[in-house]
Structure formats: C-alpha cells, structure tokens
Image (tube, rainbow, N blue to C red):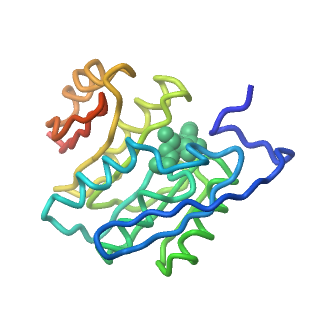
Amino acid sequence: MEHYFTNNEALKSEFRTITYKFQDSEFCFTSDNGVFSKNKIDFGSRFLVETFLKDNKKPTSILDVGCGYGFIGIVLAKILHCKVTLIDVNKRAVHLAKKNSKDNQVVTEVYESNCYDAIKDTYDVIITNPPIRAGKKIVLDILLKAKDYLNEEGCLWFVIRKDQGAKSIQKKLGETYKIELLKKDKGFFVFKAKKN
Ligand SMILES: C[S@@+](CC[C@H](N)C(=O)[O-])C[C@H]1O[C@@H](n2cnc3c(N)ncnc32)[C@H](O)[C@@H]1O
C-alpha cells in the first residue's frame, strides 16, 4: 500500500489546485497524487498555522518538518516575512513545496531530508504536523530531536489528534521540554514545547 511518505516515481501525476485565504492574503497550492492531504488543506495543519499566527511573537527563522506541498511553511513565510526552511522525505512533496513557494512569491529553502539529516542550522521555531502513519518512532524522532535544532529560546510547535496519542506524546515530551497545550478543536490538539 502506498503512503504519503513513500517515494514512488512511477505514481501517475494528477495535479490539482487548492486555495487558501488568511485575512487579506490569498494562496494557491498545487498538489498531486502521493502527497499528504492532496485534495484539501488538512484541518490540523490549518488549525496549527492559525493558532501560531495568533501568537504575537515574530520569529526570525522557522523550520517546517514534513512540509508536504508546503502549506505551513509557505503561509508563515508570506505572512511573517521571516526565513523559512521546509523539509520532507518525499521527493514529490519537496518538488511541490519548491513550486508552491515560487507560485506564492515567497523565498524559502526546501530540502529532501529524512528527519533532520539535511539540517545544520538552528531555528527560532520548528513547526510540524508530524507523519503519524510513519509510526511512533519517526514521530518521536521528529519531536524529540527538534531540541537540537532550536535556538536557545526556540519553540517546537505541533498538532496531533487526541485519538492519535496526543496525551501520551505530551507526557513523553514533558521529559525533554516544558510543554503547553495551547488549543483544542475537533479532537486536534496544538502544543508548544520549549527546551527545559
Ligand atoms: C501529516 S503530513 C503533513 C504535511 C504538510 N506539512 C501539510 O500540512 O500538509 C507529514 C509529512 O511528513 C513527511 N514525512 C514522513 N516521514 C518523514 C521523515 N522521516 N522525515 C521527514 N519527513 C517525513 C511526509 O512525507 C508528510 O509530507
């Protein structure tokens, strides 16, 4: 069975366009077969971005881990005018995130990367809608290793569904971070975690 994180170059492309509006800013994303939430913006990703944008602090640098076609990173780059890097293990997602950055007139850096393998810098914010279907080990790798790629006062932001283990992940991350549940909606939880 194909997953949204599997690289399958033989998978037939069927491009589609997804639009999104935040206040006065309009976005247009190209999506394709073989990437996460290919037909619409995922509710959890939208909830995460909109919760993040209500936070008043403006970061200088953001890393979007598991960027898919680029929704989270591209919206934040455009609204906040900060340096955004996007990474994903899925080549098709990386290609789309590059195209979507250009099409939405934002300058970003986009890399193919298994977890943080391609990352050398540190960031004010790491943000992710983690790949639950890739398994708990990968999810915990992404969430726990974020600590090594955050600036001193940096924060990890993520969204997770209650029925996908939000509570146990909160408990586990509590060993490494000061973790705060910021918002809940329709069973999705948005967390902000700071280095202890
Ligand atoms: C839940 S999706 C979120 C996608 C995108 N951020 C969005 O909001 O539409 C998780 C993403 O993580 C990627 N992913 C899975 N395993 C990964 C890994 N080991 N390293 C980096 N990214 C990974 C998947 O390809 C997928 O695009």
Q: How many marks?
A: 0
Quadrant of the image occupied by residue 49: bottom left
**Residue 116 in the image: x percent, y percent?**
49, 48
Give the residue at x 27% y 71%: 60
Viewer can see residue 179: no
**Quarter the C terminus occupies:** top left
**Residue 186 in the image: x percent, y percent?**
29, 31
For this orientation, the residue located farthest to the bottom is 105
Residue 53 in the image: above or below residue 128: below
Give the residue at x 52% y 55%: 87
**Quarter the N terminus occupies:** top right
9 displayed left or right of 181: right
84 displayed left or right of 147: right
Residue 105 in the image: above or below residue 10: below
Give the residue at x 33% y 47%: 148
**Residue 95 in the image: x percent, y percent?**
67, 62
